Amino acid sequence: MPKGYYPRTDYHRKRISQGAIKYNFKGNRNPNWKGGAHSHCSYRLIYIPNHPFADCQGYVREHRLIMERQLNRFLNPREVVHHINKNRKDNRIENLILFSNEAEHQRHHSFFRKRNINNKQFLKINLAQP
């Protein structure tokens, strides 16, 4: 038998499953709970298991939640929320734009690539016009 390997007997399996049921360490009952938020691929995720568009682990991207609160409705899964300054952790409402679909979002990006301008210059141009 390799060093450090101990086979589990039926007794061990029974004790482990009883402990999991007894203590129920899910969510805020877990001693490592940090408020239900963490980051993945630079996006901030919030734990809301009852949300209709939560992933399989119960998390929703924070920028989508902020846009939903602003609009007072759930976002369609096809709708895309874009970060103006390209910082995925900056979820201020003034930094977010909602696109109805991915094609419209890509058109927005191609507009900048063709004209070789950035988002800040684009906002200055659009805000200057009445």
Image (tube, rainbow, N blue to C red):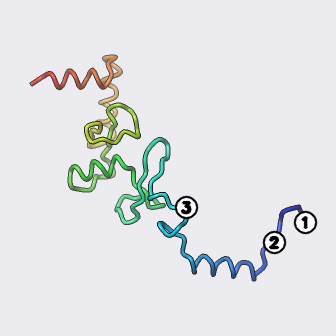
Residue 70 picture location, percent across and down = 22, 49
Left/right placement of residue 31 relative to residue 4 reads left
**What is the C-alpha distance between the residues marked 1 and 3?**
33 Å
Instruction: Name the N-terminal-most of marks 1 and 3.
Output: 1
Residue 39 picture location, percent across and down = 48, 47
Amino acid bearing label 1 = Met
Q: Is disc 1 in contact with disc 3, using a CB cutoff of under 8 Å?
A: no
Label 1 or label 3, whichever lies nearer to me, is: 3
**Residue named by callout 3:** 32
Residue 36 picture location, percent across and down = 45, 58
Q: Would you place residue 113 above or below residue 24 in this image? A: above
Residue 55 picture location, percent across and down = 44, 58
Q: Secondary structure at mark 1?
A: loop
The N terminus, quarter of image: bottom right
Q: Would you place residue 86 above or below residue 60 in this image? A: above
Q: Is disc 1 in contact with disc 2, using a CB cutoff of under 8 Å?
A: yes
Left/right placement of residue 46 relative to residue 40 reads left
Viewer-side residue, 58 vs 112 = 58
Q: Would you place residue 21 above or below residue 71 in this image? A: below
Taking the spot 47% from the left edge, 66% from the top edge, the residue there is 28
Q: Image quarter for residue 49?
A: bottom left
Q: Residue furthest right?
A: 1
Residue 1: give its label: 1
Residue 7: give its label: 2
Amino acid bearing label 3 = Asn
Q: Residues within 10 Å of mark 1 (few under 14, many from 20)?
A: few
Amino acid bearing label 2 = Pro
